[in-house]
Image: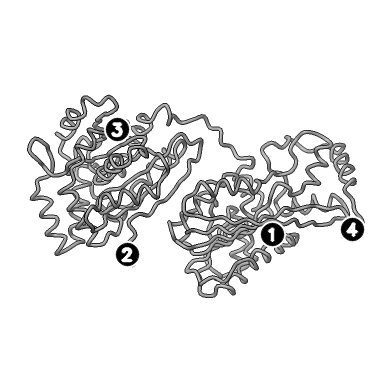
Amino acid sequence: MPERLVRPEYLPATGVSRCELVLLHGWAGGRDCWRSLLPALRPWANVTLIDWRPPAVEGGLQALAAEILAATPARATYVGWSLGGQVATALATIAPDRVAGLVTIASNPCFTARPGWPGLPMATLGSFADELAENPLRTLRRFAGLQARGASRERALMRELLRGGGDWSEGALATGLQWLADVDTRPGLQRLTCPQLHLLAGTDALVPAQVATSLATMLAEIPDAAVRILDADSHALPLAAPRLLADALQSFLAPAAAVPPSSTATPVAKGDIAASFSRAAERYDSVAALQRDVGQRLLARIAELKQPAVLLDLGCGTGYIQPQLQTRFPHSRYLGMDIAEGMLAYARARHPGAGSWLAGDAEALPLACESVGLVYSSLAFQWCYRPDLLFAELARVLEPGGSCFFSTLGPATLQELRQSWAAVDTSQHVNGFLPAEDLRAAAATVRGVRLQLHSERIVLRYGRVGELLGELKTLGAHNMNSGRSGGLTGRRRLAAMMQAYEDWREPAGLPATYEVLYGHLEKT
């Protein structure tokens, strides 16, 4: 099976997105080199991390550029570190309409010294190539040492570089070294019309200090080109100086990338959700008939699948469905995850030795990329109000060909209770849930996934309104909306709501409608 050249990881902005950023690592590296920058970038930018490898074919740089363009947004600012800077420049030259801006980091448009241009001696790269053929591991260690040289924590940084390496094949390593020796992107830089910024370290064992002067001279007649030297002392800028880089990127992209005021509060705070369900853990199963019924219906919808290596029960709650999932997929490693620590404690005690139990938010999964074959999630996603983050995270952790089967609640849920309260006051007394249209639109923004949705209405019956309210409270699913009125609901208003609810009474009792959406998200 041929080696995959490009593995994208799409991370939507956690705040209001002002731009698209695509980040490209360097030789022998991997996308994890950018992790330290993400907290500073994601409040204002959608970020695509690219794991890339050079193809061992003629015209390989152009072939790689085409694959990267196929995996990235229609228009973005491309940021490349070291050899990744040359790849980003090639992209901007090949597809200028796709590139809103170019940033290179500790990169030389011509890494080898040429007449009138500073760079590494050709003999240095030649020695790397010779050593690679004899001892690849020693070559990688030597290269990591050069990248970390000069840093205040040089040895720790070297170890970090080796741990975060991209596990390149020997062929890819050899081709990358050949690119470092041969590629010259200077003509392309001089033709670019998009804004460009070149960030260099004060001291760099791989990019001579004179490159800054040579670059500035070469680009002097281009108004939207800038060269900056950062107060950092190693080639490994993404790992050694993430804050400096993030600030430089934001300054370069301002005002478009100015961090907006915090305006992304969700209708229900995640802390409130976790606390409410933690308190409900001990009594949850006693009133969770609907939840069990929907969980069974969802399980029945899962088509025949091969045994995934890892099965994630996302929003596992008390672990009720764990035995059935493990029976259905006996050779899979079960991982139960929930945002509520109280639920997890109950699940561990109830199912000792059943698998692993982990606290986590579905919109920020604490799991590695492509580490899960199947996700099962029943009645948990209704507490996620950023479906773009949710589906991007699922796409990130699912293996190629993996699936997520889920159920969630739609906006018609508890419509009778909502309308009965509306007859009394204008406060929000019932949690609101996203419609199917929002889920479809969010999935459409995530590359490489397909979403299928089906819906049904389930109606429960109660003798009194108080039975429904008591059940919701016991479940931990009572009103947690940030728009709810403060303080206790007065007896008069509660009595008025109950009276209004009586208008819904039928011979079988008072109805409570649940709009259940069943989804299948497949990673292609």
Asked if marks 4 and 1 touch (Cβ < 8 Å), the reply is no
Q: Whole-Å distance between the Cαs marked 2 and 3?
A: 34 Å
Query: Of the residues shown, which amino acid type is indicated by label 4?
Result: Ala
The mark nearer the N terminus, 2 or 3, is 2
The mark nearer the N terminus, 2 or 1, is 2
The one nearer the camera, 61 or 11, is 61
Query: Of the residues shown, which amino acid type is indicated by label 2?
Result: Pro
Asked if marks 2 and 3 touch (Cβ < 8 Å), the reply is no
Label 4 neighbour load within 10 Å: few <14, some 14-19, many 20+: few
Query: Of the residues shown, which amino acid type is indicated by label 1?
Result: Glu
Secondary structure at badge 4 equals: loop
Query: Residue 179: x and y, percent?
Result: 19, 50
Q: Nearer the viewer, mark 2 or mark 4?
A: 2
Numbered circle sitting on residue 143: none
Residue at 21% across / 34% down in the picture?
Answer: 202
Residue highlighted by disc 4 = 508
The mark nearer the N terminus, 3 or 4, is 3
Residue at 75% across / 35% down in the picture?
Answer: 427
Residue highlighted by disc 2 = 2
Residue highlighted by disc 1 = 282
Q: Nearer the viewer, mark 2 or mark 3?
A: 2
Asked if marks 2 and 1 touch (Cβ < 8 Å), the reply is no
Residue highlighted by disc 3 = 196
Q: Is residue 486 left or right of residue 57?
A: right
